[in-house]
Image: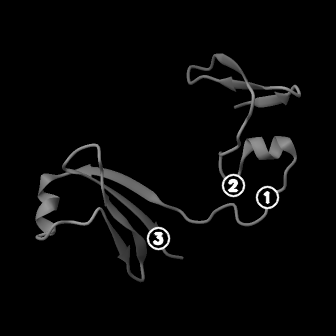
Amino acid sequence: MKSFEDTGDSVIVRAERRDGSPLTVRARYLIGCDGGSSRVRKQMGVDLLGDTEIARTRSTLIRSPDVMRLFPDKPAWMSWILNPRITGSWSRSTATSSGWCIAISPTR
């Protein structure tokens, strides 16, 4: 998104496609879900209350049938990782029977 214009009964959004060509979209609403450095919020003139960063997370999707051997009993859908250096989660992906998503956040 490059910019937007509130026309009263709609919003005109000007954006740029990945190839650099312009894109214009007209919609009834524009919802700014673009993070703490929100371009939408800034253009609206709305101040941010709170932190711009709650946590830094790295997510990785892995596919490995061997992972199931780490869970001799029926594995849970999600397990939590808690230790002094790192926190996160280990969850089963619904994409494949052998897919797992690991999301970790280094502690500060």
Secondary-structure class at tag 1 = loop
Query: Which amino acid type is marked by label 1?
Result: Leu
Q: Earlier in the sequence, mark 2 or mark 1?
A: 2
Secondary-structure class at tag 3 = strand
Q: Residue at x 42, y 78 (%)?
A: 85
Q: Residue 21: percent from the left, percent from the top?
A: 63, 16
Mark sitting on residue 98: none
Residue 77 left/right relative to 47: left
Mark sitting on residue 106: 3
Mark sitting on residue 48: 1
- The correct choice, above or below, for 39 with respect to 79 in the image is above
- Tell me the CA gap for discs 1 and 3: 25 Å
Query: Which amino acid type is marked by label 2?
Result: Gly
Q: Residue 81: percent from the left, percent from the top?
A: 36, 73
Q: In front here: 56 or 41?
A: 41
Q: Earlier in the sequence, mark 1 or mark 3?
A: 1
Number of the front mark, 1 or 3? 1
Q: Residue at x 75, y 28 (%)?
A: 28
- The correct choice, above or below, for 8 with respect to 86 in the image is above
Residue 55 left/right relative to 23: left
Q: Residue 4: percent from the left, percent from the top?
A: 79, 30
Image quarter where the N terminus lies is: top right
Mark 1: few/some/many CA within 10 Å (<14, 14-19, 20+): few
